[in-house]
Image: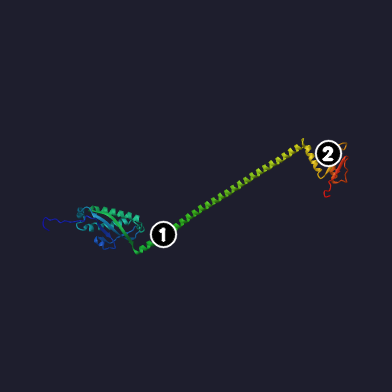
């Protein structure tokens, strides 16, 4: 090298991609990659994690003075630190927790922060850590699937038990509702019977009051009639009744003078003589007419 010349080292200013995968593609060969990170879970199982680390050089001077020129920032910078950090952060997950996205994302963020903290002193900034997929060994995968099925069976039984409890509660509510309906119906029937009995009692009371009024009216009528019969018009009424006795007789000849004379105004004597006449009409051969009486029986209207 001629005296006075310096060697210029160039570093990329754009984003860089480092992948850890067991399934490289043609696109993967355009940038640096290594095998997938082998992570031991908190419960002792191993899982291969395919991931991508996106980073950039923010301080070339620190890079060249700490890790060296050229692509040494990959060999001595990002590669040696990536897998240990991933094992530290993701290794906190159990086998099952790897399948829970929120928990896995939380540990990926932690891994990104730890890796960025470790690379900042050498002039490298980590922007993103992306986990694409992970894979357990076939035997572990079968165990996990079997355990998942067992868990699903437990969940299924719990759900069925919960459903049975809810169904029992529903049946209880339905039973209580039906009982309440029956009680209300019985109360309604009892109210109907009570109101019907009250109505019948009211009707009977009013009918009894009406009958009493009718009987009182009849008694009052009889009383007034008796009073009328005992009054001044009773003589005429007796005369009319006595006239009914003479129905069927064409002529009755009564003497108005002498001891046997008939005085129409002497009601008592007229009644006694009318009784005698009535006996003659019933049985003419058994009685004799009083002196002064003449009787013409009805003539035969057919002759």
Query: Which quadrant would residue 70 be assigned to in this image?
Result: bottom left
Residue 181 x/y as whole percent: 54, 51
Query: Which quadrant would residue 50 be assigned to in this image?
Result: bottom left
Reading the image, the residue beneath label 2 is: 270
Query: Which quadrant would residue 256 be assigned to in this image?
Result: top right
Which residue extends farthest left?
Answer: 3
Residue 135 x/y as whole percent: 33, 61
Pick whichever of labels 1 and 2 is earlier in the sequence: 1
Front position in the image: 186 or 267: 267
Indicate which disc residue 152 carries: 1
Front position in the image: 130 or 290: 290
How many residues crowd around disc 2 within 10 Å: few (fewer than 14), some, or many (20 or more)?
A: some
Residue at screen point 43% across, 59% down: 156
| 59 sits left or right of 189 in the view | left
| 82 sits left or right of 179 in the view | left
- In this rendering, the answer to whether 14 lies above or below 296 is below
Quadrant containing the N terminus is bottom left
Q: Nearer the viewer, mark 1 or mark 2?
A: 2
Residue at screen point 78% across, 38% down: 236
Front position in the image: 215 or 86: 215
Which residue extends farthest front?
Answer: 303
Q: How much space separates mark 1 and mark 2, taking CA atoms?
A: 127 Å
Residue 118 x/y as whole percent: 26, 54
Q: Secondary structure at mark 2?
A: helix
Residue at screen point 75% across, 37% down: 228
Q: Secondary structure at mark 1?
A: helix
């Amino acid at each position: 090298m001629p005296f006075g010349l310096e060697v210029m080292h160039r570093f990329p200013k754009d984003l860089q991609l480092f992948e850890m995968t067991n399934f490289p593609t043609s696109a993967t060969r355009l940038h640096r990659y290594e095998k997938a990170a082998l992570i031991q879970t908190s419960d002792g199982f191993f899982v291969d994690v395919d991931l991508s680390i996106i980073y950039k050089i923010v301080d070339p001077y620190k890079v060249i003075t700490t890790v060296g020129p050229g692509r040494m920032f990959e060999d001595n910078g990002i590669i040696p630190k990536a897998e240990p950090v991933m094992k530290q952060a993701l290794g906190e997950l159990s086998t099952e927790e790897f399948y829970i996205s929120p928990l896995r994302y939380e540990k990926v963020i932690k891994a990104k922060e730890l890796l960025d903290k470790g690379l900042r002193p050498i002039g490298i900034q980590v922007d993103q850590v992306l986990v694409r997929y992970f894979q357990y060994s076939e035997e572990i995968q079968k165990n996990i699937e079997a355990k998942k099925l067992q868990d699903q069976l437990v969940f299924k039984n719990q759900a069925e038990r919960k459903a049975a409890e809810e169904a029992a509660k529903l049946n209880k509510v339905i039973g209580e509702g039906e009982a309440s309906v029956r009680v209300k119906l019985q109360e309604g029937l009892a109210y109907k019977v009570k109101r019907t009995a009250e109505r019948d009692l009211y009707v009977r009371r009013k009918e009894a009051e009406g009958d009493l009024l009718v009987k009182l009216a009849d008694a009052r009528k009889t009383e007034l009639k008796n009073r009328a019969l005992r009054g001044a018009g009773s003589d005429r009424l007796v005369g009319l009744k006595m006239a009914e006795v003479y129905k069927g007789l064409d002529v009755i000849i009564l003497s108005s003078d002498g001891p046997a004379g008939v005085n129409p105004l002497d009601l008592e004597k007229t009644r006694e003589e009318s009784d005698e006449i009535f006996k003659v009409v019933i049985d003419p051969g058994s009685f004799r007419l009083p002196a002064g009486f003449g009787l013409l029986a009805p003539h035969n209207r057919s002759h």
